[in-house]
Image: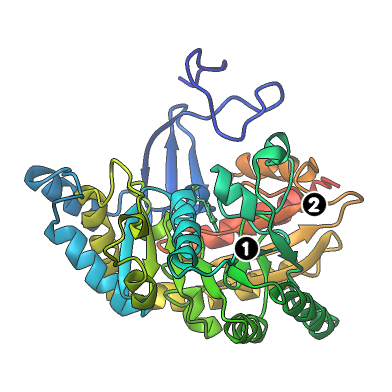
Amino acid sequence: MQPSTWHPHLWHPTTQVAHAPVPLKVLQAHGATLQLADGRQLIDAISSWWVTLHGHAEPTIAAAIAAQAQQLEQVIFANFSHEPAESLADRLSALSGLERLFFSDNGSTAVEVALKIAWQWWRNRGEARHRLIAFEGAYHGDTVGAMAVGARSIFTAPFEPLLFDVARVPWPHTCWHDEGVEEREAAALAELEQALQTPSAAVILEPLIQGASGMAMVRPPFLRAVQERVRAAGSLLIADEVMTGFGRTGSLFACEQAGLRPDLMALSKGLTGGFLPMGVTLASERLYQGFISDDPTATFFHGHSFTANPLGCAAALASLDRLEADPERYTHFEARHRPHLELLSHHPLVRRPRCLGTVAAFEVAVDQPGYLNAVGRRIQHLCLERGVYLRPLGNVVYLLPPLCLSDAQLERCYAAIGAALEASPG
Ligand SMILES: *Cc1c(COP(=O)(O)O)cnc(C)c1O
C-alpha cells in the first residue's frame, strides 16, 4: 500500500517537503503507463521529466542493456575504448555533423563540458575571450557552471555569489497568432549584436524550445539570424539539445529544423531512451584540434568515473535503432497534438497556445504568472484524479509524452486538462 508519510532516509529533488504531497510509489511502468503501488494507473504525459523517449520498458532497449551487462558493464575510458562507445560516436557524429564526441553522465555535465571546451579552446589559442552570452529564461542544468549560464531564478538565488557573470539577451518566444514577434526578434538581435561587440567565447542556447522556463518557443529564422551574428563576430555557438534532441521537436535534432550548425552540442535526457543516465557533448573537429599540442596544459583535463559507460552506450544505440525504424512517430506527433490544442485554445483561461513536435503548451490566465503560481499544482492535482500525470511549470501547462502514446491516451490527457480548467483553478 501507498505509505502516507515521507520516507525517513530520502531527499527528493526540487521538493519543498513542508507543502508537497507525499511522493506516489511506483511499482512498474510500461509504455506510457505508470503502475502505482495503490493499484492506480497514470499516463506519464511528461515522459518522466522529459527522458522516457519511446515509452517505459521499451523491450529492445531493455534487451540491449541486459545483453551488454553480460559482456562489459564498465571500463575506465582513459587508456581503453570499446565497441559500444565507438559505434555511438560514429552514429551521432554522422547524424549531428559534429565529428568528436565527449562522454559525461547527465545534461548538466554535458553543458559544463561544452562551456569548458569553448573556454579552453580560446585559451589554447592565446586569445582572451572571457565573455559568455546566454538568453533570458535559459535553463542549462543545476551544476554551478550550468546554473551560471541559466537565467537567475529562485532555483539559483542561494548561489548567486558563486555564479560567474554572463551577458544576457532576450528570448523572443512566440505562440499561435502572435503579432509582435518580428519586432521582438529584431530587438533581441540588436541586443545580441551589442553583446557581441565584446569579444566573446561562446553563445549558448536551447534551440527552438526553452524547456524549463516554460516551453518557450522561438522561430527558426530568429535562430538563423542569431547564428549569422555569432559567426560574424567569430564566436562559438553551443546548442543545448538536452531536452530537444532525439525527435522531441519533430526533427531528430532541433538544430536541423532551425538550420543551425553549432560548434558544440549537448545531449542527454532522450539519449538512452530514458533508461540510463548519460550525457554527451559533440564538438567540431576544429575545436578538437585546438587541444592537440606538445604543451600539457593544452589538454582537456576533464573526466567522469562513468565516462562512456557501456550499458548507457548500448541503450543509446538501441534507442537510435528504434527511432530510425519508425521516424513518423516523432515527425507526425505535432499533427496529433494540433486539433486538441486548437479546441483547448478557445477556453477562456487558455493563453498563448503553442506546439512543436511532441511538445504542446499553453499558459493559464492568472494575475501573477511564474513558477510559484499555485495554479499549476491545482491542475496537477485535478489531472491526477483523472489518471494523468502532468507537472506544470507555474502557470504553464504542457504535454511532452513518450512517442508510444496512443491516440486514446492523448485524448485522455487533453480531456483531463479540459476538465481541470472547468474546475476553475484560477
Ligand atoms: C534538463 C536539462 C538540462 C540538465 O540536464 P540534467 O540531466 O537534469 O542535469 C540541461 N539543459 C536543458 C535544456 C535541459 O532541459
Label placed on residue 422: 2
User: Where 224 falls versus 383 (above or below)?
Assistant: below
Label placed on residue 362: none
User: What is the spatial separation of the Cα atoms under label 1 and label 2, in whole angstroms?
Assistant: 45 Å
Could you say where residue 195 lies in the image, as x and y percent from the top left? 73, 72
215 relative to 6 in the view: left or right:
right
**Residue that appears at 24% across and 48% down:** 309
| Amino acid type, mark 1 | Leu
Q: Nearer the viewer, mark 1 or mark 2?
A: 1
Res 194 quadrant in image: bottom right
| Amino acid type, mark 2 | Glu
The residue singled out by tag 1 in the image is: 132
Confirm if mark 1 falls within 8 A of ligand 1. no
User: Where 344 falls versus 40 (above or below)?
Assistant: below
Q: Nearer the viewer, residue 221 or 342?
A: 221
Could you say where residue 411 lies in the image, as x and y percent from the top left? 57, 62
170 relative to 43 in the view: left or right:
right
337 relative to 26 in the view: left or right:
right
Could you say where residue 260 lies in the image, as x and y percent from the top left? 52, 82
